[in-house]
Image (spheres, rainbow, N blue to C red):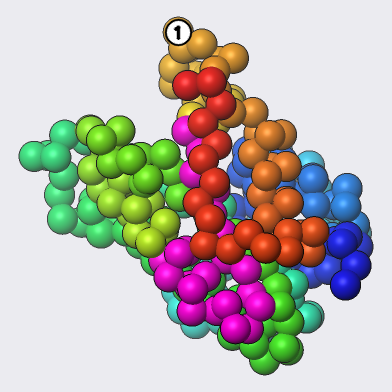
Amino acid sequence: MTETLEGRHIVVTGGTGALGGAVVGRLLEQGAICHVPNAHAAAPQHFPFTTHDNVKLAHNVDLSDPAKVEAFYSQVPTLWGSIHLAGGFAMAPVEKIESASFAEMMDTNARTAFLCSRAAIRSMLASDTAGRIVNVTARAGLDPRRGAGMVAYTASKAAVAAMTVAMAEELKAQGILVNAVAPSTLDTPANRADMPDADFTKWVSLEAAAEAIAYLASPANQAMSGTLVPLYGRA
């Protein structure tokens, strides 16, 4: 088996975001063909790969809708990898979290990861492809003590972590490797704007996170599965 991504088809949900753009860029450098679902009618202006030959954008894809997820994955030829970066974040004291807000976090983070993983697994099994799945949990998802003030978010990311390990165990015989990364604070423009007094040097760079994700999604990863990779930087 070749250890490159040249010509391999990879889905990147959340691919038009800050981390998504870094991941798509790293995959393109390695020759991958990136399929990027977008919830809106057009890609955001800041997405730099809209016209790239190896980027296939699909618009109006609601990743919480099972039918739309299945339809999106059905048009990807011989799927090799599926990377799930789409998600959301919310903070609130536990006594102020409404049921709808909790459900929204579970839908945005855990449900989308499940639906996309399931669609990817179905595609890989149908084509007998020993592919790769990469989810994104969070530091708080692995250590809930860090989830004070963001209980709904922490619960949703803990669910992603648990699903990742369970799926990896279930799919061992098929050779499909399932892993997740668990970042702490990522060094994004939005996070810098929200926390202007923080020490940005302690945060995780988008390039470092993208490199780890690209490795887990690559055929060079021959043995890692069921792993929750901490990306904590210097925090």
Provide the secondary structure element on which disc 1 rests: loop
In this rendering, the answer to whether 164 lies above or below 93 is below
Compared across the picture, whether 184 is left or right of 146 comes to right
x, y percentage for residue 198?
Answer: 46, 12
Q: Is residue 112 left or right of residue 98?
A: right
User: In the rendered structure, does residue 182 fall within the stretch colored magenta?
Assistant: yes
Whether residue 185 is situated above or below residue 183 in the rendered picture: above
In this view, the residue farthest toward the bottom is: 126
- The image position of residue 202, as x and y in percent, is 54, 18
Q: Is residue 219 visible?
A: yes
Q: What residue is at 63 percent from the left and 59 percent from the top?
A: 224
Q: Would you call the spot at circle 1 few (<14 residues within 10 Å), some (14-19), or many (20 or more)?
A: few
User: What amino acid type is highlighted by mark number 1?
Assistant: Asp
Q: Residue at x 45, y 64 (%)?
A: 165
Residue found at x 88% / y 52%: 30
Res. 76 in view: no
Q: Residue furthest left?
A: 95
Q: Position of residue 47 (x, y in %)?
A: 72, 43
Q: Measuring from the top left, give residue 137's x and y in whole percent.
A: 45, 50
Q: Closer to the camera, 24 or 60?
A: 24
In this rendering, position of residue 124 left or right of residue 143: right
- The magenta segment: 163-184
Q: Which residue is tagged 1?
A: 197
Q: Is residue 83 magenta?
A: no
Is 30 situated left or right of 126 in this image?
A: right
Q: Residue at x 28, y 51 (%)?
A: 155
Instruction: Name the image quarter holding the N terminus.
Output: bottom right
Residue 202's place in the image compared with 140, above or below, is above
